[in-house]
Image (cartoon, coloured by chain):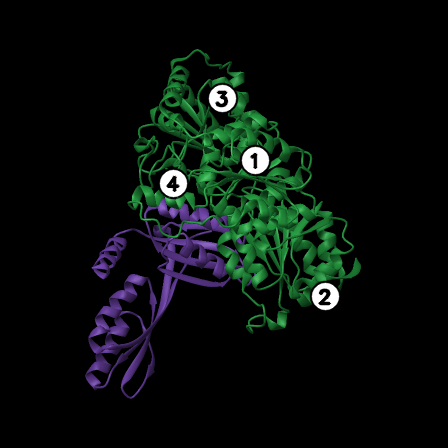
Chain colours: A purple, B green
């Protein structure tokens, strides 16, 4: 019963709008811990989080994807702004933002037909074949999470062995 | 630049911050600090348990209105502080907690008395530092005091590895520091204040709900000025108790789970709530969805994240509440606004007070919590500082002890920490040695930190423990009586210990009272005593706290009792 409830909760969450936060933080130890601990303590869910350095060596950018209503998002942004190590928090306007995710997908490819089909789909999705093994192929695909999901569902029939996704990186368009 | 070791740099930095007292306990990982404390120009108070050190620093901070400092060693010393740090965090109290840590090279090796106190303290501190080099210490300490005291205050932890304490370095003390991601100062937005005033002016039945922010920012005069312009009732949250004189003709006391009946009643009849430095906690407002329904809500707070956290509001004024209130009062005065004290809304206030005063009956016994607290109020000078333990004693204090001088009452209202009151009262006494300090206690809570009697006696910080003793975990017993069909479990203290003998064993004074006359004498004895006094007051274990708003209920479903 409880698992049924938690499933319905997940389905309900999926209907909430996708939001991307661009968070500028001090580049020092412990900052990621403070951010993720805040999410946990305040009962917020992270869809994905990426961290990397920026054009300034002492500053990092976190790109956090969440699915939530506007009130929760507002509260989350305020709580993030309270963290001492956080310099700036912006909610990116999805229409005016370039966002990309990278995924590595390893799938079963034993027979020549499968290999040809996978290569074909990879071309359509502008994905790259990174590795071909005796029984498997590995593909690198970059794009919006939707595009990656679409590719994943197509190649699912061959049998996915492993997936590694980076989460979203994003920047607003223009200056 | 001067050459010195890290521990010396720490002490010098604390001196530069104007620290005059620290509460602590030594151990392996803070020995270099203790060695330097020998020559420090401030006082060190040795506690018997680190939890008490944090509560003492907390009580000191609440009265002195600046950061309290506590010191512990690594591992268990540091974890013992956590309850006190979490208590200060829940009540937004400025505190700098300094812990020793194992040497840098040992961190992560599961060394003896190593604990990840930065990780453990994360959810209950405003920030935590771990300097890795002695040269960092002065800047870290300056930042710690700046962060803990500014904006919405909250505890800051500084965890110093032992080798960093011992390291010799050329130390520089910065005059100015900058914390890039931290902008605590907000000037209230004038357009928001205009909107707030518009709403207030439209209201026929406005009410002020004053929270702890009023006390933290010391906005007593400003609050009183606003209330007297608007001529409206003033309720407080429990944390805001004593932010407004409770004998004032507009005062109605605290709302909430064990709020005053008339306060809980009047706030649901209002049409506009002016919440000042309050966070709409479940204890104060009951159900978030029900509270303030159909009313306009104005929210003044220093913390932008409090706006809309528990309750959506119509107008938010973000900024230090003292400065926001000052601006509002000034603008109302300029507009020539001054409401008539002879208004029907204030008549309703009077009516409700009279109704509940005659309806709510006290028990007929000679000694009841209510009678003893009324007696205490009668005998205490109004400037006395009063704190409480947690449980029935705390709620009785809220209901029956009126705070007259603003800012002289505090309690662990957010975390509800049993054992808080007694050490906190010792800290308060250290902050203001010339006024009487009283801890309104229950036996269950007092048991948790009673070994602070040694500190009170040896450090000559005498306080009065006003022990409402039912030899019960009384609040739990009340809930078991009310919600669990009198199936008592884990609440009886079985007449143990003898509190008079306990007090005497520490060199304190213990007085057991049997009548109201005894109590009168005991309070007077305590007030003139130069050692701690424990007044053991027998309370009937069946005595309940009323009124009561059951958890999950709205204020309108208050049970008045009987």
- Left or right of residue B1, residue B521 in this image: left
Q: Is residue B140 above or below residue B340?
A: below
**Marks 2 and 1: in contact by CB < 8 Å?**
no
The residue singled out by tag 3 in the image is B227
Q: Helix or strand or loop: what does disc 2 sit on?
A: helix
Q: Nearer the viewer, residue B287 or B534?
A: B534
The residue singled out by tag 2 in the image is B166
Q: Is residue B273 above or below residue B480?
A: above
- Left or right of residue B186, residue B392 in this image: left
User: Which tag is nearer the camera, tag 4 or tag 1?
Assistant: 1
Q: Earlier in the sequence, mark 1 or mark 2?
A: 2
Q: Residue at x 64, y 33 (%)?
A: B525
Which residue is the extreme one toward the bottom? A134
Q: Nearer the viewer, residue B423 or A29?
A: B423
Q: Helix or strand or loop: what does disc 4 sit on?
A: helix
Q: Is residue B429 above or below residue B103?
A: above
- Left or right of residue B154, residue A1 in this image: left
Q: Earlier in the sequence, mark 4 or mark 1?
A: 4
Q: Earlier in the sequence, mark 3 or mark 2?
A: 2
The C terminus of chain B - image quarter: top left
Both labels 1 and 3 in a single chain: yes
Q: How many marks?
A: 4
The residue singled out by tag 4 in the image is B282
- Alpha carbon of mark 1 to alpha carbon of mark 3: how far? 24 Å
Which chain is disc 2 placed on?
B
The residue singled out by tag 1 in the image is B386
Which residue is the extreme one toward the front? B514
- Left or right of residue B511, residue B6 in this image: right
């Amino acid at each position: 019963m409880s698992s049924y409830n938690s499933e319905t909760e997940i389905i309900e969450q999926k209907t909430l709008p996708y939001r991307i936060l661009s968070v500028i933080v001090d580049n020092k130890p412990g900052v990621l811990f403070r951010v993720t601990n805040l999410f946990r303590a305040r009962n917020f869910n992270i869809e994905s989080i990426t961290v990397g350095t920026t054009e300034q060596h002492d500053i990092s950018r976190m790109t956090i994807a969440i699915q939530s209503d506007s009130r929760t998002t507002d509260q989350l942004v305020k709580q993030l702004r309270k963290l001492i190590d956080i310099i700036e928090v912006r909610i990116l306007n999805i229409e005016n933002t370039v966002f990309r995710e990278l995924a590595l997908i390893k799938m079963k490819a034993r027979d020549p037909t499968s290999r040809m089909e996978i290569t074909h789909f990879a071309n359509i999705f502008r994905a790259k074949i990174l590795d071909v093994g005796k029984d498997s192929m590995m593909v690198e695909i970059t794009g919006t999470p939707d595009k990656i999901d679409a590719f994943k569902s197509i190649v699912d029939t061959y049998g996915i062995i492993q997936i590694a996704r980076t989460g979203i990186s994003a920047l607003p368009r223009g200056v | 630049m001067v050459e010195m070791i890290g521990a010396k740099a720490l002490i010098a930095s604390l001196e530069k911050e104007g620290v005059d007292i620290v509460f602590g306990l030594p151990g392996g990982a803070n020995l270099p600090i203790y060695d330097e404390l020998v020559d420090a120009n401030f006082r060190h108070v040795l506690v018997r348990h680190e939890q008490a050190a944090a509560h003492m620093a907390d009580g000191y901070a609440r009265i002195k209105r600046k950061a309290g400092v506590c010191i512990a060693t690594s591992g268990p010393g540091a974890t013992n502080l956590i309850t006190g740090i979490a208590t200060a965090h829940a009540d937004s109290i400025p505190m700098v907690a300094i812990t020793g840590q194992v040497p840098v090279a040992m961190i992560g090796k599961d060394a003896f008395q190593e604990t990840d106190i930065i990780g453990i303290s994360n959810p209950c501190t405003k920030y935590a530092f771990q300097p890795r080099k002695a040269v960092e210490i002065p800047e870290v300490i300056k930042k710690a005091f700046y962060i803990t005291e500014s904006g919405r205050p909250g505890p800051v932890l500084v965890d110093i590895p032992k080798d960093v304490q011992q390291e010799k370095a050329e130390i520089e003390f910065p005059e100015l520091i900058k914390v890039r991601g931290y902008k605590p100062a907000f000037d209230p937005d004038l357009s928001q204040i205009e909107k707030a005033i518009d709403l207030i002016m439209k209201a026929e039945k406005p009410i002020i709900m004053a929270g702890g922010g009023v006390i933290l920012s010391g906005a007593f005069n400003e609050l009183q000025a606003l209330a007297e312009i608007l001529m409206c009732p003033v309720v407080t949250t429990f944390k805001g108790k004593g932010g407004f004189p409770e004998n004032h003709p507009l005062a109605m006391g605290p709302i909430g789970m064990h709020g005053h009946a008339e306060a809980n009643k009047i706030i649901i009849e209002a049409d506009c709530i002016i919440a000042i430095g309050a966070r709409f906690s479940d204890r104060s407002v009951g159900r978030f969805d029900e509270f303030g329904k159909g009313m306009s809500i104005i929210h003044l707070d220093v913390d932008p994240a409090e706006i809309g956290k528990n309750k959506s509001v119509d107008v938010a004024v973000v900024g230090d509440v003292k400065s926001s209130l000052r601006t509002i009062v000034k603008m109302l005065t300029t507009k020539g606004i001054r409401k008539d004290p002879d208004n029907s809304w204030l008549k309703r206030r009077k009516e409700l007070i009279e109704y509940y005063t005659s309806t709510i009956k006290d028990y007929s016994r000679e000694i009841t919590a209510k009678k003893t607290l009324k007696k205490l109020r009668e005998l205490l000078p109004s400037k006395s500082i009063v704190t409480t333990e947690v449980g029935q004693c705390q709620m009785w204090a809220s209901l029956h002890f009126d705070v007259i001088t603003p800012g002289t009452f505090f309690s662990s209202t957010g975390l509800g920490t049993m054992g808080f009151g007694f050490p906190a009262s010792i800290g308060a006494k250290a902050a203001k040695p010339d006024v009487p300090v009283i801890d309104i206690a229950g036996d269950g809570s007092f048991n948790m930190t009673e070994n602070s009697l040694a500190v009170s006696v040896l450090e000559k910080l005498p306080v009065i423990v006003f022990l409402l003793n039912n030899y019960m975990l009384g609040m739990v017993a009340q809930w078991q009586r009310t919600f669990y069909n009198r199936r008592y479990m884990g609440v009886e203290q079985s007449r143990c210990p003898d509190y008079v003998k306990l007090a005497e064993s520490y060199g304190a004074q213990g007085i057991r009272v049997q009548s109201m006359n005894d109590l009168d004498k005991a309070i007077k004895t305590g007030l003139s005593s130069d050692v701690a006094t424990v007044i053991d007051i027998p309370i009937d274990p069946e005595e309940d706290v009323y009124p009561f708003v059951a958890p999950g209920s709205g204020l309108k479903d208050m049970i008045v009792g009987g």
